[in-house]
Image: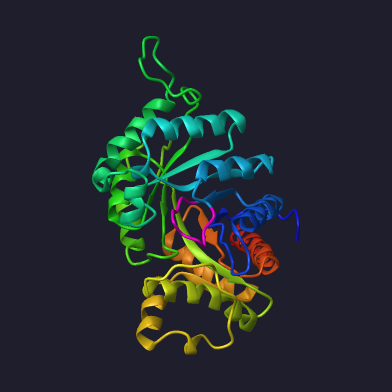
Amino acid sequence: MEGLRIMVAVSVLDLVPVVEGQEAGDALRNAVALVRHAEALGYRRYWVAEHHNMVGIASAATSVVIGHLAAATSRIRVGAGGVMLPNHAPLIIAEQFGTLEALFPGRIDLGLGRAPGTDQLTMRAMRRDPRAASEFPQDVLEIQAYFEPAAQDQPVQAVPGAGLRVPLWILGSSLFGAQLAAELGLPYAFASHFAPADLMDALAIYRERFKPSAQAARPYAMPCINVIAAATDAEARHLATSLQQRFTDMVRGRRGKLKPPIADIDGYWSMQEKAHVMQMLRYAFIGSPETIRRELSGFLDATGADEVMVTAPIFDHQARLTSYALLAEVAAGLQARRSAA
C-alpha cells in the first residue's frame, strides 16, 4: 500500500500518545515512524498538538516535536494542531515557527487555538494569566504582522519570521473560532474528534461570513475525526476500546497513558458514562475498509469538508500504521468514484 496517492484531502493529527508500558521517548519515536508512513501514503499534512501536564501525551514542546518530524521527512506538511496561543507571547511563536519555516521552506503550518491545553493549576505553573484567552484575536493579528516583511524602521521583528508568511489556521470547538476564522479570512479546523456538537453550525457560520484575505480567497474547512480501521469490523471495535477507555477516564476526571484494548468495554463504563462518551465520539468511524468508506463518504457529503484530519488513538503501533494505510486506500477509492461520477 506504500506510495498510494490520496486524492481526497486527508491529513493526520497525532496526539503522540504514550501507551501503558512505554515512556515519552517511545511515543516520539513512534511519531517519526508514523509521519514517514503518512508521507509515503500521500497524506497532505501531519499535525501535533500542545498539551501540558498529561502523562499520556508527549507533544508539550510542540515546536520541538514539529522540527524533529519535519527533519525526518521531505515532502509532507508538518505543523501545529495547534499551539495554544494564550500560553505564549506572539513574538515567541512567530520566532519559533519562523525558524521552522526557514529550516523547512513551504512545509510548516501554524494552527492557533485559544484553549490552554491544560488545567488551571498548570497554567499558573506556566506563569500565564487565565484572562489571556480574551486577547486571542489580537494575538493572532500580532503573529500575522510578524510574518509580514519588516518595515525599514520596524522596532520589533521576528527573526527568523519576518517575510516568511507561515500559513495560519484557526482551530476551534465552538462558534467563536468559526467567526474569527471567517472575519480574518483564514482556514478553519474544527475539533469534532472530541467536541462534535457545534460542527455543522460552525461550518455554516464560517462559510456564510468568510471574508477573502491575502492568505485565502475562499473558505477552507477541515474537521477532525477519529478513524480506527482494521481488516474486520470486530477487530476495529476491539482496537477502539482503548479510545473509549480514554474518554471514559476523561469523564471521570482521570488522565493517564493510553490503555490496551479490552474484551468487554461494557464492563468498564456505566450506562451514563457510555452515553456521554458516545456523544463525544459521534464522529468516530470504526470498522473495516468498507465500513469506513461508507461512513466517511457520508461525513464528507454532510459537511462539504475541503479536507479531513484524522486521529487514530490505537494502543498497538503496528495496528495504528495499518489503520492509516487502510484509510489511504479508502480515500483513494472515494476519489476514484467521485471522479467517475
Q: Which percent across, then down, holds residue 5?
A: 69, 53
Point out the image quarter for the C terminus.
bottom right
**Residue 328 in sight:** yes
Q: Is residue 159 left or right of residue 5?
A: left
Q: Which percent across, then down, holds residue 51?
A: 45, 54
Q: Which percent across, then down, holds residue 86?
A: 33, 44
Q: State whether residue 55 is above or below residue 167.
A: below
Is 231 in the magenta? no
Q: State whether residue 110 is above or below residue 102.
A: below
| Dominant secondary structure of the residues highlighted in magenta in the image | loop
Q: State whether residue 103 is above or below residue 223.
A: above
Residue at 43 percent of width and 74 percent of height: 249
Q: Is residue 259 left or right of residue 181?
A: right
Residue at 32 percent of width and 49 percent of height: 124
Q: What residue occupies the far right of the structure in this picture? A: 2
Q: Which percent across, then down, holds residue 108?
A: 55, 38
Number of numbered labels in the structure image: 0
Q: Is residue 231 left or right of residue 113?
A: right
Highlighted magenta segment, given as a residue range: 49-58
Q: Nearer the viewer, residue 70 or 197?
A: 70
Q: State whether residue 82 is above or below residue 338.
A: above
Q: Quadrant of residue 279?
A: bottom left
Residue at 60 percent of width and 49 percent of height: 44
Point out the image quarter for the N terminus.
bottom right
Q: Quadrant of residue 259?
A: bottom right
Q: Quadrant of residue 262?
A: bottom right
Q: Nearer the viewer, residue 114 or 19?
A: 19
